[in-house]
Image (tube, rainbow, N blue to C red):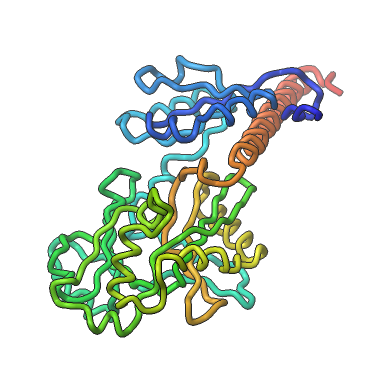
Amino acid sequence: MSSPSPCSSSGSSQRYRIGYALSAKKVQSFIQNSLVNQAKQRGIDLIKIDSTKPLTQQGPFDCVIHKLYSSPDWKDQLRQLSLHQPNVVVIDSPESIERLHDRTSMLDVVTSLKIPQGSQTFEVPNQRVVHESENLMDSIEETGLKFPLIAKPVTADGSATSHEMSLVFNENGLKMLKTPIVMQEFVNHGGVIFKVYVVGEHVKCVKRRSLLDISEEKLNSTAADEGLLSFSQISNLVAKNEFGGCSELEKAVIARNKGKGFCCSEVDELVEKAEMPPLEFVMGLAHGLREALVLRLFNFDLIRDSRDGNRYFVIDINYFPGYAKMPDYESVLVDFFCDLVEEKRRKVELDVKENQEVRCGEIEEKNHLCE
């Protein structure tokens, strides 16, 4: 079996250094031995950045990847790095990342995309941001939102509280919520969510279990005191329990559907039988979001309307998601690292060429001897 080819196409044995600044939890999930070893085989060393020390005093780095919110001066450190070492590729810019921290405007980029739509269409669910001074029920009625609703925190910074959500069935459920909050219409989507991972030019779509459909009968028969189901991260809560059965959330939704439509043994079949979205459609949407967001490490959650198999909704976008959950994540990320190395090489070559042209111009201006 042949060993993986190095990143550099020039045949050079040079090694490249990619620094990573991540939380301890992110390091544990992302920087696994399998990723480190595969990167080493391609000539790349992954170097941990110490956030307690000045970034410009560490390295040298060819590239820097980061997702760090605990350091208050991190943004300024990246700015200083770009100022003093402009050839270092930084993924991604803090300004672009911050756009995804606010669910008030997170999905605006989807509605503004100008990409061709064929048989498949995409949109975002109807939603309303209810501010602290506003009445929840009045705001819902003014906007025309219909139950059931998903209640989400306004802030989406990756913290535990940013993942605390609720499924709201009626007005009584609204009374249990606090503002400010984002209220988003729940779209029945067959209990399947498509997670689209974007890693630079690389795109991978996987299907996962999601919230089950909520029948009209269930919605109309929900008792007044059963108006709310709280949860944290759909992907975690609908994961199988230790015995391979349904999650607590799935059991709750099934119970509230009066046992009709699905049973626990059938939940996995929903995912297994679900058709993947057309590749061309997914790639086009991923490319459009990558260009509009000016980001290279993110994923977005895509659902398909149960009533219309060609109608899709983008319901969430996350920066630097849990890539280790993506099949063969090591190969995808290492290929991306190689892309960054090539980008760095091109930047250096361009700088050298521009400097030579400047020097040549200065000499020519002085004695007209430059050829």
Residue drawn at x 57%, y 77% is 310
The foreground one among 251 and 218 is 251
The foreground one among 330 and 119 is 330
User: Where does residue 88 sit, x and y in percent of width and height?
Assistant: 57, 27
User: Where does residue 370 sit, x and y in percent of width and height?
Assistant: 83, 21
Residue 72 vs 117, above or below: the answer is: above
Residue drawn at x 53%, y 57% is 289
User: Where does residue 316 sit, x and y in percent of width and height?
Assistant: 42, 59
**Quarter of the image with the C terminus in it:** top right
Instruction: Give the tally of numbered discs.
Output: 0
Residue 182 position by quadrant: bottom left
The foreground one among 366 and 150 is 150
Tell me: 178 left or right of 295.
left
The foreground one among 208 and 173 is 208
Tell me: 331 left or right of 46.
right
**Quarter of the image with the N terminus in it:** top right
